Image (cartoon, grey):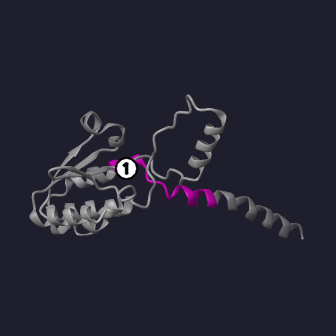
Amino acid sequence: MRLFNLILLLFMLTLPTAAQETNTKVRLTQEENETWLQDYQQVEDSEEKLNMVKTKILYDAQFVGPRPGISLTGLNEAQRQALKEQESKKPRITADCKILFVLQTTQSHFLDLEKSPQYKPFVEHLETFSISDTILTGASASAIYGTRARCGVVLLKTEDPDALNYLKTINNQK
């Protein structure tokens, strides 16, 4: 009986550790994004690059990105409590940061499917368009796009009529 209790105790002590390991696996880290950018820069084939971008955008859509802090200055106690309750209902942050994908045509389109899900059909057909890319990191990315560019920016540029028509259709459906 003592042996059984000892085994049961050891088993129960290992359960929380296993559960914690599972939870940390669903977090997108800055290191993962840096590795992805390095791998991306080494690819020569434009179709393969667009396929990588497509896969990354679709993958990142499952993660909730960091949100800016909230200032409680100037609010009374009831307003503070209401704001805290509202924030507590939002999904928890599961990404240290995300790579910012920006499609530049005559205007900028941020291809973050968490915030702009209407771009999903466009992203799913990304490799079929003629698109060039530029990567910005560090100070140059932050100077243009601020703190949301902390993990880097991939600028996608196109004048492809099919891509522009697709975007026009998506934007008219809003």
Side of 148 where 128 appears, left or right = left
Side of 71 where 45 appears, left or right = left
For label 1, the residue is 98
Q: Position of residue 67 (x, y in %)?
A: 46, 44
Image quadrant in which the C terminus is located: bottom left
Side of 62 where 123 appears, left or right = left
Is 29 part of what is drawn in magenta?
yes
Q: Looking at numbered disc 1 in the image, what kind of residue is underneath it?
A: Lys
Up/down of 83 relative to 57, above or below: above
Q: SS for tag 1?
A: loop
- Give the quadrant of residue 158: bottom left
Which residue is pictured at 38% across the width and 55% down the height? 115
Which residue is pictured at 19% across the width and 57% down the height? 43
137, 82: nearer the viewer = 82
Is 151 part of what is drawn in magenta?
no
Up/down of 62 relative to 105, above or below: below
User: Residue lying farthest top?
Assistant: 74
Count of numbered circles in the view: 1
Which residue is pictured at 37% across the width and 62% down the height? 59
Q: Position of residue 102 (x, y in %)?
A: 25, 51
Side of 64 where 171 appears, left or right = left
Q: Position of residue 160 (x, y in %)?
A: 10, 62
Image quadrant in which the N terminus is located: bottom right
32, 128: nearer the viewer = 128
71, 5: nearer the viewer = 71
Q: Please, what is the dominant secondary structure of the magenta stretch?
A: helix
Q: Position of residue 121 (x, y in %)?
A: 28, 69
- Give the quadrant of residue 5: bottom right
Residue range corresponding to the magenta coloring: 19-34
